[in-house]
Structures are given as C-alpha cells and as structure tokens.
Amino acid sequence: MYSLLVTARDGAWDLPAYEFEKERFLEHTNDKERALFRSLDAERIELLKSFPCLFAYEGNSQPLRVGYIRAIKERSRSIMIEYEFEGDIPPIPFSEISPILNLLEISKGEMNRTHWAVKDESLFSRLHTAKLIDPKFINPVGRAGKLEELRFKVAFSFPGEVRESVLSIVNQLKSSLPSGSIFYDDDFTAQLARPNLDSLLQTVYLNNSDLIVVFLSGDYERKIWCGIEWRAIRGIINNKSDHAVMFVRSDEAEIPGVFAHDGYLDLRRFSPEQVADFILERVRLNERQ
C-alpha cells in the first residue's frame, strides 16, 4: 500500500507539516482500505506511517516527491501530518508519472482535487518498473525502502538454537512466495544494526507482518530479544487476531501466555519442508480473508 497526498496550496510540500480537512481523508480510496482506516487509533496510525507516500500538487505542471509520513495528529476537524522526502529520489516530473497513473490506482481527474488517498498498490515496485527510481531501492530480497516501511507475508521469531531449521524453512518458502515477502533477520543485517532496535522489531512484528511464525522453546523463553518480540506477538493475540500467529514447538517448555489448548506444529515430528508447506497454507488462507 501507499498514500497519495495531493494539495492545491503552492509551496505546501516545502514545509515540514501539512493539514488535511478530515472530509478529504480517504477520498478516492477503495472500500476495503476506507473501512480499515476509518478509525485512526494508534495501531492504524502506525500502519499508515509504514507506507511510502507520493506527494503531489493539483494539476499536471509540478513534479511529485516520494517520502514517508513521520507523525499523524488527529484534530477535531483536520488531520495534521509531519513528513520527509526520500533524499535519494529526486522530484519526478508529472509527465513521467502520467503513463502509469492507472497502475498506481490514480483515477482520471483525481489529481485535480486536494485529498489524501490510501492505495492498495506497491509504489516502489511500480516506480522501479517504470525506471523512475534507482535499482538500489530494490534490496537483495526484492524489497524497496526502509525496514519499518516494508510489509511482509511472513515474519519469523525464534531463538538462535533453531536457526538452522528456520533457515531451511525460509529457503523453502522463498521458492513459493514473492521476493522480499519474508522477514528473516539475516536478510536485513545492515538495517538491524542500529540503536533502539527493540522499537523497530516491535513495529515489524506488530504492524508490518501478516503472519508471524513463533518457534517456542525453553531457549525462546530465556532470550531477551525473543521476549521483546513476544510482547508484540502477545498484543496481536490479545487483539484476537489468531489468524496472524502460528506456533512451532521444539520442546515442551512453559511459555508465559501460551496455554495447553493452543495449537502448534511439532518441529520434532515434521521436517522443515513440511513446516514450510504448512506455513504456506496459512499464508494462502490469510490472503483470502
């Protein structure tokens, strides 16, 4: 997904913040996305901030910018955003965007009205295919942009003791799922080498992943980083989003928050190839929801 932000105010995108009237939010947005973001609670605000954005002026004479929303504040009659542009993507002339407007889900005449739309399209992929952004925005696993702005079909949470099995499962899934749709930590080593990593990981697990596969064990319960990830995962479970979590066990250790009636795959019973097939089945079921 991405946000399209259009304004008629000259020079608006030269400022660090902008305010949309509430009635202009979600104009030219499909029903599914409109329903999702009708209520701007904390979780949905974080989700909106995870999407890349296309910043535009009304008409077809001024260039567009690519960037990210960094803060959203809802007021009585308006929504204020703070944002920044992607410094490595120069302004894109409208004439170069025009041929792919339909691929970006931008309707005819939509560029003539100030509004904020949420589109169910991959902005970076479309821009890259049209040769409007540098190939470096497609990372080695096929995704563009910063980790906190990416969306994953599957994310893995596990202790290092089962890394060999997890890697076998990941490699099996990569042959069946779109490139870059899996969060496996070693694929993002450079981006994970940063301060405040706990906040980033919680964003990945809580907001940016459709299915989280958790490898439960005594090692998982003891590891600090697994505990940080588990806090986000527990939030998903408490929100009754059971379809978004899948348990895999390698021993019978007690894990706070996991109960005897919770279902799981037994890593001692199933091979990595079989576990990968089960995960793929869950991904396909989630896609139909």
Image (cartoon, rainbow, N blue to C red):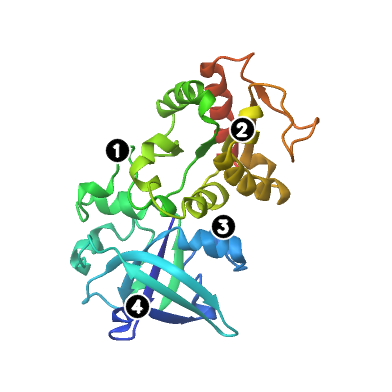
As shown in the figure, which amino acid type bears the numbered disc 2? Tyr
User: Where is residue 225, by image quadrant?
Assistant: top right
- Mark on residue 140? 1
- Mark on residue 220? 2
* Separation of residues labelled 3 and 2 (CA atoms): 37 Å
Instruction: Tell which of 20 and 184 is nearer to you.
Output: 184
Asked if the residue under mark 3 is in contact with the one under mark 4, i.e. CB atoms within 8 Å, the reply is no
As displayed, is residue 173 above or below residue 72? above
As shown in the figure, which amino acid type bears the numbered disc 3? Lys
Q: Is mark 4 on a helix, strand or loop?
A: helix
Q: Position of residue 136 (x, y in %)?
A: 23, 47
Quadrant (top left, top right, bottom left, bottom right) of the C terminus:
top right
Quadrant (top left, top right, bottom left, bottom right) of the N terminus:
bottom left
* Separation of residues labelled 2 and 4 (CA atoms): 53 Å
Q: What element carries label 3?
A: helix
The residue carrying mark 4 is: 112
